[in-house]
Image: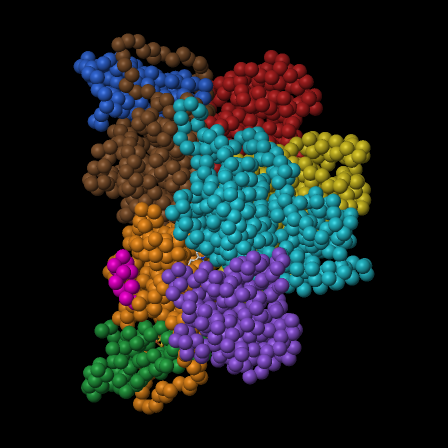
Chain colours: A blue, B green, C brown, D orange, E red, F purple, G yellow, H cyan
Amino acid sequence: MEQQTIAASVKERKVKGKVEINIQKCKGCELCTLACKEGVLSVSNHINLKGYRYIVANNDLCTGCVNCALVCPDAVISVYRTPLKKKSADKSIGKEE
Amino acid sequence: MEQQTIAASVKERKVKGKVEINIQKCKGCELCTLACKEGVLSVSNHINLKGYRYIVANNDLCTGCVNCALVCPDAVISVYRTPLKKKSADKSIGKEE
Amino acid sequence: MTIEERSNIDIIQEKDNNIIGEPYETVYQKPGTLIDVDMHYCPGCYHSLVHKLLMEIIEEMDIQEQTIGVAPVGCSVFAYDYMDIDMQQAAHGRAAAVATGIKRLLPDKYVFTYQGDGDLAAIGIAETIHAINRGENILIVFINNAVYGMTSGQMAPTTLTGMQTTTSPAGRDTNIHGHPIKISELVAPLPGAFYVTRQAVNNANGVRRTKKALQNAFNYQRLKKGTCLVEIVGNCPSNWKMTPIECTGFVEEQMMKTFPVGDIKLPKAEDLKNLKEA
Amino acid sequence: MTIEERSNIDIIQEKDNNIIGEPYETVYQKPGTLIDVDMHYCPGCYHSLVHKLLMEIIEEMDIQEQTIGVAPVGCSVFAYDYMDIDMQQAAHGRAAAVATGIKRLLPDKYVFTYQGDGDLAAIGIAETIHAINRGENILIVFINNAVYGMTSGQMAPTTLTGMQTTTSPAGRDTNIHGHPIKISELVAPLPGAFYVTRQAVNNANGVRRTKKALQNAFNYQRLKKGTCLVEIVGNCPSNWKMTPIECTGFVEEQMMKTFPVGDIKLPKAEDLKNLKEA
Amino acid sequence: MLEELIVAGFGGQGVLSMGMTLAYAGMVEGKEISWMPSYGPEMRGGTANCITIISDNKISSPILSCFDTAIVLNQPSMDKFATRVKPGGLLLYESGTILRPSDRKDIAIVGIPATAEALKMKNARIMNMIILGAYLHLKPVVSLDSILEALKKVLPEKYHHLLPINEMALEKGEQLIHELEEPVMLVC
Amino acid sequence: MLEELIVAGFGGQGVLSMGMTLAYAGMVEGKEISWMPSYGPEMRGGTANCITIISDNKISSPILSCFDTAIVLNQPSMDKFATRVKPGGLLLYESGTILRPSDRKDIAIVGIPATAEALKMKNARIMNMIILGAYLHLKPVVSLDSILEALKKVLPEKYHHLLPINEMALEKGEQLIHELEEPVMLVC
Amino acid sequence: MTETKLMKGNEALAEAAILAGCDAYFGYPITPQSEVLEYLAREMPVRGGVVLQAESEVASINMVYGAAGAGFRAMTSSSSPGISLMQECISYMAGAELPCLVVNVNRAGPGLGTIQPGQGDYFQSVKGGGHGDYKLIVLAPSSVQEMADHVFLGFDLADKYRNPVLLLSDGAIGQMMEKVQFHAYQPPRVDKSSWATIGKPKTRSRNYITSLFIQPEQMEQHNQKLEAKFRLMRENEVRFEEMNTTDAEYLFVAYGLSARICQKAMDISRAKGIKVGLLRPITLFPYPSKRLAELAPQLKLVLSVELNSGQMVEDVRLAVNGKVPVEFYGRMGGMMPTPESIAEHLETLIKYHHDN
Amino acid sequence: MTETKLMKGNEALAEAAILAGCDAYFGYPITPQSEVLEYLAREMPVRGGVVLQAESEVASINMVYGAAGAGFRAMTSSSSPGISLMQECISYMAGAELPCLVVNVNRAGPGLGTIQPGQGDYFQSVKGGGHGDYKLIVLAPSSVQEMADHVFLGFDLADKYRNPVLLLSDGAIGQMMEKVQFHAYQPPRVDKSSWATIGKPKTRSRNYITSLFIQPEQMEQHNQKLEAKFRLMRENEVRFEEMNTTDAEYLFVAYGLSARICQKAMDISRAKGIKVGLLRPITLFPYPSKRLAELAPQLKLVLSVELNSGQMVEDVRLAVNGKVPVEFYGRMGGMMPTPESIAEHLETLIKYHHDN
Ligand SMILES: Cc1ncc(C[n+]2csc(CCOP(=O)(O)OP(=O)(O)O)c2C)c(N)n1
Ligand SMILES: Cc1ncc(C[n+]2csc(CCOP(=O)(O)OP(=O)(O)O)c2C)c(N)n1
Ligand code: SF4
Ligand code: SF4
Ligand code: SF4
Ligand code: SF4
């Protein structure tokens, strides 16, 4: 049901984001899923070599807000975005919401 | 010259005091002389067995206020007073001025 | 999740399925100063997160060559395996003394310690307070997770009232164990403390603010005006016996009550003038 | 006065010349609990004075049998030679831990430590803070004379800014040595601290107030509500290189500026209710 | 009787408790026992093992370099301990997790799909008990009764409702041995 | 030449500096020297002593139990060290302070009223130099010139205006020996 | 009372402490012995007695000092780095003649090292890691049962001699489980009223605890008093275990865990016809030197086996005083010598000494 | 440059530190060595170098750790109780292979003891007061000149072996004045860039200082590396002084102050026709065992003279391995054996051994 709402918001996105997850390094702590309000991230049904259920992304919903990457303890997530305007300062951390 | 003033005050005393100095234990620090405002105490011209110039008292001037005894680090001074009214509490320390 | 539960999932070796094409530009990436190995920290442990932040700052400020870190005993004792900077491993509790030794000899380098609460607040409180009192121009990064992580969950000086640990099985009893020590509040009044703040990385904004605080602290170190202490509310899924997400809840509902986030001591404006000029 | 100056006075053995007859009554006398030997302290040293006060209180409260003292290393290490109570000599800095060991086993006895500033504020600050943080029901008597007396006048954590000592020959430089630590102010905010006060024995009224503070602290110990710390501004004629009278001036003009006397933390009225009832 | 056994796998697979259950059972039967865990620096995710010795006589060294039996539950443990089984000994492993067992010919090598069976029984945690059941069938160093007695000590009171499923798991292990295609030939 | 000397008295009587002056003078003359203070726990009021050795050859033990000369400035030191003077040695003491000198017959015992003389010279502090002058007259182990040279090192710069009075004191000491009723008979 | 239990070494030790009437435990967590504190934190409040987690090892041992000085049975435990921090106060306690039990669950060093078992703290324990002339009675358990037994023994000896007793275990003995029995025990009634600080009644003069003797004469007198005590320990408290020594031509000397391994090595060698025995010192101080000297004439070779670079071997050499060659075999860093490798090493040495 | 000065041992040591290029001194006051800190607090700020009074000995040595880890010549000094507190970090420094100079101006213990000189810290210094397998190079000056010389030597050896060096003096040598000369000295250029933490340039991989090797295999490897270093020290760094040994039938072995006293005792005995010599170990680790073993055959008796209850005597016995009787004579608690009493003791022993 929440899926609905999220899908709706997708349409309004001004920038498109994509996340890339290094699944072998992911420890499946799920903190990123908590941070992502767009519902991009979910736990896979598979486990990686370390034995953790890693995270997979539905990049269609991604706004590139970097919240997930910020909270990922193991620096597993890279985030990409379609350029809007170049912002020079503090590129990696985004703006506080 | 100060002697004069002190002598004057003697007459007005309601209680008479006496101090007793254990001169062999006195270290001649002179803190008692600073504490005694009646000029009772002065440094002797003699030294005791430990090599210190000890303190002597002119008990005629003593009011028994115990100030000297309180500040004597080495507990060398005993103080006696003619009784006025019996005060039961805290006899050893006197009243704060 | 225990391995037993995990085992109903096949172990697979899947190729990364997120391939990025144009016209995307990178907005977040692991800093190059964070060595590309698995960190031994438990899943969801904030230690790894703070490591990442520190390495981001060092990369962004381009001070890898100017920075020396000190990590004493605690779960972060292996920090030198992850941070691509010169580091010293210190005896339990003595990071602030070790950092003093370094900084006094290398006054123009950035020197920071990275300490847990057992380390900094229990055995190392003397070294901590005296380094701060001398106003050593170092940064103390203080990860307060309210337990001894490495040794498996004993009570720390910061353990919350009533919190169960292996050495306070009936919960921390203030009559016996005393109240949790608030280190930041304790040391802030010392004139040697230049900047004291408490942050938490419980959500993305918390991470942003924590990073800002750490950035400030690195910048302030150039002023040589005293010690910066950045306390970060930590977690410990393994010893709190919670999932990382449960930990986040505990941090927000319990930890932050006893250890409220916010700045505790800010530099005076006049002190910061020089920094802006530089 | 050096021995050379003294030598122009004959050594004599004079009989006490103050013989007291009736109708005088005794209003002040050395307490019986202060052992009748010469104390090794330098002339005019406040250590002896505070010893005397403590023994007066123990005599007046009639708690000789209930009291155990702990004196660590410092000029007062020989305290057990003077105080007629059971005592333990502790390692440098560790009096609070030793007292903890005693008090936890003998919770109904009065336990106090008697510590110098080098001892309590330098090497022993960890034990001090943690004992107070645990709220150990002990009394800490803290003689702050701003130098290391016993070892001949080195700088202490409490040495005043600019003050010359053998290890700060150019005066304490806050940029190098930090500011003097105000222990009472530092520990008072800890919930385990029940009563924190700073007093001075620079004159008779100061002695009265100090004694009252110590008396309070002994009484409060019965409540088992936490640690009492009575800081007493000390002196050190030998290492300050002043006469005792000059010291008094220095205490009043310099020491009390950095270490103002007064109560820093008072028990709450409700806590004291039990005491009055008892 | 002297059985020198190592159990090895991931921390969390129930490695230590398997050895401990055996040790308790040995005690129930009045045997001499020693149980020696290896303890690692990591809180989680490391490998764990324990050496359990059950003997009629007093036990000398609790630390051994070769074993009558090795029970291994993950690949690293297989790689490490397969070579340490004494000739004629037993190497028992979880066949769902370990894809490359040893190719030694001088020992009995037995794989059991205990994980899968445990999942069928809807309780992943009893995997170790299935293995234990299989082991005890192959080497009855202690009786099943003693094991059940031991479980009461190893499991905290509040988990005693799990005793029946543990018993079922032990039996399942025995059964799995019967179902093996080739019969197991133990030398000793 | 080998002189093994102890100087003992109250802390503050200039005991240590007397030995140190001798040591410096020895150094000026290129001799081997050692100066060993005894250090006590008390800041003030304790007794102090120092062993000074001046020798043409390398010095072995800096700690000695008997001495060629003992210079004692208070009664406790007299009581302690009189017995430690080697037969034929010298025991020099301040006669104003020490009322009970030793009654040994096998050594030379010389008392000097140095305190009184120092007071006459209006400087109590030079008492030790008077004694030193007396000693050097009895045992010229170093020359007076060397002593004066040494004093420049021992006395901090700001006290160099006191050098003349120290010289006078040294001479006074020599003179006091001449004024003694009985001449001093030194064996060695 | 003599129920048999299966327990970890550390837990058996903790349980024994309670049964031995330990009044107070003060400690600080460190692997591999945190179970002691954890066990007591659980049990002591229920079963009586004080347990307190201190802020450091320095604080722990000083709390023990205070409690012991007040006449109570007090103990602490730690592992190597933590024990190093206690050296000052241990020396103080020996100086002040305070009985207490200190437990070192030895891990491999130096420095932070590793948490795996080791015996690298032998010198520190036996020769004196602290300053000045003092000795600890050092007990070396080699089983879980002894982890328990030595607690009773340790407290009794501590009280008997008014001296700290060190129980020197290692990570393996601490972590392993074995059967253990607790026998009925009644702490001996020791009258400490002549020195313990429990408050001075009018009827006696004050008691004070001190290790300070500023006058050298007094200090030396005190030293001599202590030395006399250490002599007495040497005479009366030597404990060791001997196996297969009657006909032995070769001898393993080993304590604690390594003695257990040697026992197996001995079986291996004996099976090959090599007449080897084992002497296991139970007290490391006082050391069974006399017994070693007695055995020396019948021996061709002694092999000291340790989990260090060769420490106890010095005491073995001192004991036999050149009468028989003494060799050393050891592993370090938490690595364990296998019984096979020990047996093999012995054979090599036999050949070497035979050839030379 | 080679002006002769009259200085206290402690001051000569402090002056030498400056001349030896000591970059940093961290210390805490304690009698009888506070002059070192006081001297440096006066001189260092003027002549360059860092001097800092730490809050404790634990902090001092950890500051040294930091400075040494950053590649600087760093030192601390203390006396017995303070040195005990440093044992953990000293073990860390040995483990992390950090060069530094630690000075112990030994006073008599145990415990607070007295401030008078002693040699009771021999075991702690030489065998290892800290945990784990490690060794310090231990230098034992016996004159004010050596108090200075050993500072240069100590720093050089520390750098050469990347190991802490302990200068073990005593209160008497620290407090006495003698002539001392300072020779021109240029600190050797030691390249520490491969390990010192001074900030990682892009051109090299990071440096880190650690004594942690959690895997036993790695830890043992590290232990073996350290042991190899200690072997090298044993081979190359033994230093001692010999007097009258050519024809000696008896031998005093003594270091530091007691060697000075023995020298006089030797003169006394020689004067009586007793052929006694003196061996004075200058390095206590590595110990001149080889030389002692060489001398053993010509000797009838060896007497180890110490200001303790008999510590170094064990190393003497280990060295001669039963080939000649080794006896001990010592005083404790700050009391000094007189040359006469030593000579007398030797005579008694000669008679005793002759009769037995
Ligand atoms: C002297 C000493 N004592 C104890 C230990 C054991 N020890 C290692 S880490 C640690 C505490 C870790 O807790 P904390 O500092 O809070 O860090 P965390 O592991 O929680 O991150 C302890 C007690 C040690 N290594 N050294
Ligand atoms: C471990 C240790 N370090 C240092 C010393 C030396 N020491 C003895 S007393 C003292 C300081 C005394 O100063 P303080 O505590 O201020 O007391 P005071 O003598 O001024 O009364 C020191 C450093 C010691 N005894 N033990
Ligand atoms: S936060 Fe990072 S490690 Fe945790 S589940 Fe998400 S991607 Fe994985
Ligand atoms: S205060 Fe006491 S010790 Fe000082 S001079 Fe007066 S009587 Fe003497
Ligand atoms: S034990 Fe706790 S603090 Fe340590 S890595 Fe795991 S979660 Fe983090
Ligand atoms: S040195 Fe100072 S503190 Fe010590 S007794 Fe003398 S005056 Fe008092």
The residue stretch that appears in magenta: D248-260
Task: State which image quarter holds ligand 2.
Answer: bottom left
Q: Does residue H146 appear left or right of residue D236 in this picture?
A: right
Identify the main secondary structure in magenta.
Answer: helix
Above or below, comparing residue G28 to residue G100 in the picture:
above
* Residue at 67%, 45% in the rendered image: H288
Whole-percent x, y for residue H180 in the image: 53, 52
Q: Is residue D256 magenta?
A: yes
Above or below, comparing residue H67 to residue A71 in the picture:
below
Q: Is residue G208 magenta?
A: no
Q: Quadrant of residue D273?
A: bottom left
Asked whether the viewer can see residue H338, the reply is: yes
* Residue at 78%, 35% in the rendered image: G353
Whole-percent x, y for residue H204 in the image: 44, 24
Of G136 and D193, nearer the camera is G136
Whole-percent x, y for residue G138 in the image: 61, 50
Of A48 and C181, nearer the camera is C181
Q: What is the residue that sits farthest to the top in this orientation? A: C22
* Residue at 39%, 60% in the rendered image: F157
Q: Does residue D228 appear left or right of residue E85 in this picture?
A: left
Quadrant location of the C terminus of chain H in the rendered image: bottom right
